[in-house]
Image: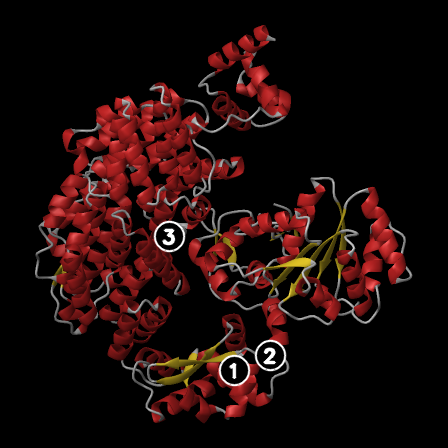
Amino acid sequence: MAGQDSGEPGNIRVRLTSQPRLVGREILLSQIKAELAASDRAGVVLSGEAGCGKTRLLQEASAMLQEQGVRSLTVQAGQSTQGVPLQALASAMASAGLPIPQSAAEACAVVSREHRRRPLLVCVDDAHYLDHATGALLAQLARERRCLLALAVTGSRTTSQEVLGLWKDGWLCRLPVTSLSESQLVAVCSELLAEPVEFTTAARFAILAQGNLIVLRELIDSALESGILTRNTHGMWADAGDHVGARLQELTAPRTEALSEAGRTALEALSLAQTLPLTAALRIADAAVWEELESHTLAQVEEGPEGADISLADQLVGRVTAWNVSALRRRRLLRQLLYTLQREGHAEGREVQFTLWRHEVGRNVAEGELLSSARTAWWSRDWTTAHALAEAAWRSHRTPAAGLLFSKILSHAGRQAQAHGVLDVLASSPEPHVAAAAQSISNRANILHALPMAEEIGEPLGLHPDALTYSPADLSGLQVQTTLASSDLDKAVLAFMSGDCRTAWKSAKRLLDDSDPLRVAVAGAVALPALLRLGRPLDCLGITPRLEWAMRSLDEADLPDYEILNIPVLTCYAEGITGRRPGAVARLRKLARDAATSRNTMLASRAGLALARLLFEQGEVAEAHRLFCGAGGNDDLPLVQQLARAGEVISALHLDDTHLREAAQLRLDPYLNDGPQPVDIDLALATCDMHDGRRQSAAKRLTEAGRRVLEHGALGELADVVHALTRIGHSETAAALCPPDSQNVQGTVDKIRIAFAKSTAMGSAKDVTLCAEMFEQAQAPLYAAEAWAVASRLHQRAHEPRMATAAAHRCAKARENYRGFPTFLLYAVEEREPLSNREKEIALLAAAGHTSQEIAQRLVVSPRTVDNHLYRIYRKLGIDNRRALRTLLNQRSDAG
C-alpha cells in the first residue's frame, strides 16, 4: 500500500484508498446508465445528503460512458464560484483544453460543437451552488439536447430555480441517493484500508459515521493518525480504544461553533448522559437552549412510555464533545446530572449509570454496589460499562470476588492476557477456595486453547474436581453452588474439540437436568454446537427452554459467565437453518451490533460468523465474505479462527476475485496444521482444488472428509460434504457416502442437500426438480440454480427439450438472486462465453505443453493467476484438464 513518512522514525503513514470499490450501488448505477441512454431525457440529477457518495457516482457514470466513446466535462461548483457567472463552467472548459467562453451563448456554442464531433457528458458536482447564468445555460442545453447532463445536488437545496426546473420540468431524471446502511459502511472500511478490518472496529466506525462516507473516511484517518488503529496478530486492522484527534474536531466544529454558551453546556451534559427525561433536561437548561440544539440537529425529542426524552441526534458530535470536556468540568456536570435526575425521580433504571458516575466524581462506592452494577451491565450487554465497573472494584478493593468477575469480563472481551494476569494474582492467594476458583477459570480457557498441544504430546487434560469447584457464596455472598468440572463436562469439551460431537453431546446431555444453572448453561454451550454438527438443529431448539432457565437463574443471581453468551448465537443459527432465516438474520445482526458497540469482540465475532454462514446460503456472498474476514479478530480460539478463515476462502472463490482469494489463503495457511480441524477446512481446500481445475483432487479430499465425519455421526457436516461432491459432478460418490439414516438430519437445507445428491446420482429429473423447488423455498438461490441446471441437463438426456428449456429458465431466474460468480454446475446451462485474448494466449501455451510456471514467466504474471485463467477456460469450454484442452484445440484446428 502506498505510504509516506509521518515524521516519526520507522512509522509509515498509511494512506486510505482514494477510489475504493463501490459498495451497495449496483442497482443505482444501472439506473443511471439506463437514464443516460434514454431518448426522452437529457440526463440525470443525483440528489442526496452530504457524504452519501454522489461525487463518486458521478465519476462512475463518467467512466461508464467513456468506455462507450463519450467524452466527459467535469464542472465543480462551490460557494466560491456561486457569485461569479459561468466561472465554474469556464474553469472546467479551460482545464479540458476548450475555448474559455465569455458569455452563455458562446459556452452553448462550444458545448454544442464538441457534442456534434463526439458525444459529450457534462458532469456538475454540487450543482446547488451554480449561479443563475450557468443554471439557465444547463436548462437550454437540456431542452435542446445539445449534450448529456449528470448533476449532483445536496438534498433539495439550490440557489437557482433554473437548476431546480431541470428535473421538475422533466428534462432530467431525479434519482435519490440514500445513505449506505451500517453493514455497507462496514464493507467500505475494508475497501478504504484495502485489507480486512476486525468486525467490532468496523461496526463502531459505521455506527458513528451514520451513513456519511466523508465522516467514515475521517474517522479511519484520525484513528490511523493517532495510532489507535493498527494491525493485530491476525493481520486485521483493529482499534485499541477511543481517541478524538484534531481531524474529528475539525470535522464536527462547524456543527457546534455557532452555539451559545448555554447551548454548549447543555450539549456537554447530554453527551455525558446520552438521554435525558425532558423534565430533568429543563432543570439543566431552559427550553430555548434545547430548542437551539434541536434546530442545529444536535438533539432530538423522542416520546417514551414514561414521557418525552431528549437524546443526541449525532453520536459523533456527542463523542467529540464528551472527549473535550475537561476533568474538573466533567465532574461538575456529572454532579449536576446526579442531583437533577435524583431530584426529579429518574434514578430508577439508571442504577448502573449512577454507580459509574458516583465512582468517577470521587464518592465512596461500596464494592458490592460496584460488582452488582457491573453484573447488571453485563447481562444488559453494556460490556463497556461492565468492564469499567469491574475494573474499578478490582483496583479499589482487590478482593477475590472483584478479581473473578473482572477476569471473566476480560476473557469474554477477548483480552485473555489481562485476564490471566488477574487470575495469577488470585491463584497465589493463601485461601484455598480463592486459588481453586481462579484455577477453575484458567483451566476452562486452557482446555479450549491447549488441546492441540496436549494431544500432540499425548497427555490427557483431565481436571481434578477439587481444582474446579468453588462456591460464589464464599466469594461474593451469592447462594449458587457451582461445580464446573465433572468428568462429564470435561469429557464433553474435550470430545467436541477433537471432533467427536456424538460423545460430546452424550456427555453434555447428562448435565442438562442438573440443579445448578451454571453447570446447565456451560453444558449447553457444548451441547448446541455438537448437535449442530450432528445435524440436529431442532433438538437444539428443544433444549433451549432449559438453557433459558439457566440463564435467567444466573441473571437473577448476578453470576455472569462468558461461555454462556454463545447460547443466543447458536440458538439463532439453529433457527436459521430450520427455516426461520429472516428472523434469525435480524437477531444475529442485532447481537453483533450490540457487541460491537460495547467492544465485546468475542461475541461480535461469533455472531458475525453465524450471520455470514446464513447470508452465504442466502446468496449474499459479498457481505458474507466481509463478515468472514472480520470474524475472529481478537478471538484466539482456534476453532473460531478455522471456521472464519475457511469461510473467507470459500466466499472469495465464489466472488472469483484473485486478490481476495490469495489474501484469504494466506490467512488460512497458519491454521491448516493447528490441531483437530473442522470439515470447513476440507471444504475450503476442495473448493480451491476445484477452482484450479483439480476436480479429482477435490473429490478425493471431500470423500476422505465424508468418511471421517461419518465415524462420529456428524450428519450435519456430512450434508455439507455430499452436497459439495454433487456440485463438482461426483454425485455417485456423494450418494455412496450417505448412510440409511442420513435423511434424519433436521436442518431444512441439509435435508435437501442429501436428497439432491441421491436424486442426481439416480439421474431422476423429477426428484432433482423437486430439490430445486425446495432450495428456492429455503431461500438458497445458488443451490436452487445449480439444481435447475442439473434438471435441465437430465431432461435433455431424456430428449425432453421443452422441460429442459423450462428448467434452464428457472435456473436463470434463481441465478438473479445469487450475487456471485457462476459455479461448475451452472455452466451446464449457461451460454458459454468466448475466450478473451489473454485466455486464448494461455490456452494455446497450455495445450503446447508449457507448465503454469513457464506460462507465468513468459507472461509476467503469477502461476496462481495462470491457474485461475485455466479454470475459467475449462469452464467456458466444458472440459476438465489440459489433455482435453489439447484435444479440443486440435479438433478446432483440423476443422479450420
Find residue 258 and report its horizontal and vertical position in percent: 64, 82
Q: CA distance from mark 2 to mark 3?
A: 36 Å
Mark 3 or mark 2, which is nearer the start of the sequence? 2
- Residue tagged 1: 267
- Residue tagged 3: 608
Compared with 104, 476 (above or below) is: below
Identify residue type, mark 1.
Answer: Leu
Identify residue type, mark 3.
Answer: Gly
- Residue tagged 2: 256
| Residue at the spot 11% in from the left edge and 52% down from the top edge | 486
Compared with 760, 531 (above or below) is: below
Q: CA distance from mark 3 to mark 1?
A: 34 Å
Mark 3, secondary structure of its residue: helix
| Residue at the spot 12% in from the left edge and 71% down from the top edge | 479
Please say whether residue 414 is visible from this viewpoint: no
Mark 1, secondary structure of its residue: helix
Find residue 530 and report its horizontal and vertical position in percent: 20, 44
Compared with 382, 706 (above or below) is: above
| Label pair 2/1, CB-CB below 8 angstroms | yes
